[in-house]
Amino acid sequence: MSEPQVAPAAPQTPGFRMIRSLGAIAMLSGLLVVLVFQYTKPIIAENQRVAIEKAVFTVVPGASQRIDIMLGENGVTVSGEDEDEDAGEKVYAAFDDQGNLKGVALASGAQGYQDIVKLLYGYDPECACIRGIKILKMTETPGLGDKIAFDPAFLKNFEALDAGLNGAGDALAHPIVAVKAGKKQNAWEVDAISGATISSVAVAKALERSMQRMAPLIQRYKQELSRVGQ
Amino acid sequence: MATLPNREEKLSLDTFVRGLWEENPVFVMLLGMCPVLAVTNSTMNAIAMGLATTFVLVASSTLISILRSWIPRQVRIASYIVIIATFVTVVDYAIQAISLDLYNALGAFIQLIVANCVILGRAEAYASKQRLHTTLINSLGMGAGFTLALLSLGTVREVLGSGTLLGIQVMPENFEPWVVMILPPGGFFVLGAWLLLFAWLKQRRERRLLEQEGASNAG
């Protein structure tokens, strides 16, 4: 048995050389990341603004301006840079060119088949109904569940989905529910997509949950909301 | 990886083409399978992922080649990872600035380029030993090979799985899309089919060579 061949030992690298190299590389990296971050930050913010705006204008037909506001028990506050959690929930009030309130857009979400389905929907206080939805984020099965984002028959459910209040004005008169495909009879029911029942139910649930809480508030502060646009 | 040179390589056409064909990172070396299978469900995603990976590969290999005599052996892997992670962060911000839709479609796989073994493999096996210009050309070739591989999966999967190519309808109206193709199993099917094709081509070439030898020996 001979000793295994050992390569001649490399000359020891002094510790400070390693620290110097690693330190210099880390500093260089940090500098590069900061430069890129600074350069892209305004562009990314602008992209996000455009994306939200586009989504808001899709779900509120006829709108061309938006103002972010916080809506809570204490009324309406125009949301500024630092958002106050106590002021309520963020809603996007959408106005037309003349500054008339066309509707409000709200974000909501519910558990779908694989993950949370996040969506934005438009509520019209005039007809007390939902005017449109847009799926923001989902991981539903392609070809089945993901139809909730683009299936024309399904999206037709949300052109005038009833979300009227009850007599006391503190909750919906009828809960928004999903029914089996083709079984829709009332204006507050959502026709599910056959083969995508769980995803359809998630959409209805997201709307129901958010509307139960927000529809009474929106109706109560309707006047203040329209004044924001003036 | 048998032809991998340990001495400094002379720049030739082969430096570039090797990455495309002979040592294609996906079809031959089977490296970086995670993004290959995960984001190739559409052509656009495949192109974006390929370009992003190519950028990180070229930029980090170049920098590593420049600094190669200056990085002590003991801390080389740590240095490579820091350099790669930096360029991945740069790409991450760049894609967000170019298109948010694309960024959302690619999801976590942009950040996961850090862990792509094609890049660390190139850094360790090539860039740390070779001069700047050969490294540049070689990593460009590898990046192009990786992009080509993603594209060959992405186009097949999009055409069969959605009936479209780059979002444009290419299949007839009555074509029922094979949904499985845009799901993860579809990635494995298509990758398997391509590997089969490449293995068959290689085998056929070897057999031809053997036959030729036999013929010349007999004659």
Image (spheres, rainbow, N blue to C red):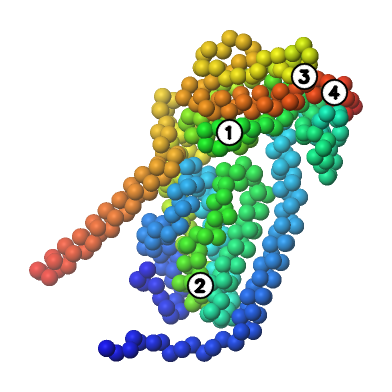
Chain-order first, disc 4 or disc 3: 3
| Contact, mark 1 vs mark 2 (Cβ under 8 Å) | no
Q: Which residue is mark 3?
A: A170
- The image quadrant that residue B72 belongs to is bottom right
Tell me which amino acid carries mark 1. Answer: Gln
Q: Residues within 10 Å of mark 1 (few under 14, many from 20)?
A: some
Q: Which residue position is annotated with label 1?
A: A111
* Residue to which mark 4 is pinned: A221
Q: Nearer the viewer, mark 1 or mark 2?
A: 1
Residue flagged by tag 2: what amino acid is it?
Ala
Label 2: which secondary element = helix
| Element assignment for label 4 | loop
* Dot 4 or dot 1, earlier in sequence: 1
Drawn side of residue A61 relative to residue A192, left or right: right
Q: In which quarter of the view is residue B85 placed?
A: bottom right
Q: Is residue A200 above or below residue A164?
A: below
- Cα distance in 3D space between marks 3 and 1: 25 Å
Q: Residue A137 shows which numbered tag?
A: none
Q: Amino acid at mark 4?
A: Tyr
Marks 3 and 1 close (CB-CB < 8 Å): no
Neighbourhood count class around disc 2 (C-alpha, 10 Å): few under 14, some 14–19, many 20 upward: many
Q: Look at the image and tell me whether residue B188 can be seen.
A: yes
Q: Nearer the viewer, residue B13 or A131?
A: A131
The answer to whether A93 is drawn above or below residue B84 in the figure is above
Residue B5 point in image, percent of width and height: 41, 76
Q: Is residue B88 left or right of residue A66?
A: left
